Image (cartoon, rainbow, N blue to C red):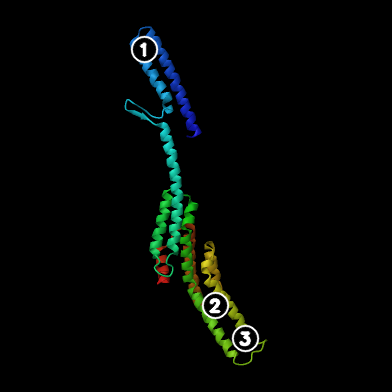
Amino acid sequence: MKRKDLTLLNTINVVLLLAGVVCLLAGIINLIQGRLDVAGTGLTAGLLFLFGASIDRFESLKGLGLEAKTRVLDSKIDEAEKILTNLRNLAEIAGGTLIALSAKAGRWSGAPTVEENYNLAMSVKSNLRNLDCSEISIRESLAPWVKVNCIDVSMKLVERLQETAHEVMLKNNALIAQMSANPIQPDDLVYQGATAKNEQVGQFQQTLRQVHLWPVEETNERLAAALKGALNLDPLEREALEERFERWYVEISWLIENQELKTKDLWFRELRRSKD
């Protein structure tokens, strides 16, 4: 019980006690004087006041159809609060585990559909909020689902960048093979340029293959850097890709910030194609 509530209860008990004593004294005086009706009223009122002042001392009191179990009730309330706290903790753990298992299970075969994962994530989020779990714990529980969605859509977005990098690599390899038919001079600038280009392309391809290692909060930044470093794109195709990436920057930012899909149908179409 809070200190303020305890002070109020004690004050009420003191007032009832004083009123009970006064009524009892008045009843006794009237009894001595022979006024039995007034004495009965005073004594009865005094006993009731004293009873009210001491009711919290009783474990269980039954009489006149009344039942008081204040101490047991307080104990049960405290117990219920502890159980609710434990239930909250359990829900947070179960929710986080459920999201993690659903997000990671069957990545190569038999994985839940994009829609199923979304519905599960939203259900867990709603249940955790209904249990008054903290926003931090909710974010942590939904983090695996958010990360997997960021990975999947990023891999889909960089597909064309991987294709153009592979095309550049093939052209360079063909050029190097052609030059290797004759003795190559160490200072051959064409050969040096081709090998340097291959190293650059190789590093770029390695970056695109490590999408799953990108920190979630850096997803948009990493995508922008990948698009900027893209090879063998004509101006019109680069402009089209920039428009596509810009739209997805908004979607990804919304997902990371709110743990929800801003445009569900867009996500469903894009990620469904990536799984087919």
* Label 2: element kind: loop
Q: Which residue is mark 1?
A: 39
Identify the residue at the far top of this view: 33
- Inter-mark Cα distance, 2 to 1: 106 Å
Above/below status of 162 relative to 118: below
Residue in the foreground of this view, choosing between 75 and 17 = 75
Residue at label 3?
191
- In the picture, measured across the screen, residue 24 lies left or right of residue 202, that is left
Amino acid type, residue under disc 2 in the picture: Leu
Check disc 3 and give the amino acid type: Tyr
Q: Residue drawn at (52%, 69%), measured in percent from left and top?
A: 211
Q: Earlier in the sequence, mark 3 or mark 1?
A: 1
- Image position of 138 with respect to 53: above or below: below
| N-terminal-most mark, 3 or 2 | 3
Q: Pointer 3: residues within 10 angstroms few (<14), some, or many (20+)?
A: some
Toward the left, the furthest residue is 65
Q: Nearer the viewer, mark 3 or mark 1?
A: 1
Residue 19 position, x and y percent, is 43, 19
Residue 176 against residue 27 in the figure, above or below:
below
Q: Secondary structure at mark 1?
A: helix
Q: Nearer the viewer, mark 2 or mark 1?
A: 1
Residue 234: x %, y % from top left: 52, 79
The image's mark for residue 231 is: 2
- Residue 54, percent from left and from top: 43, 24
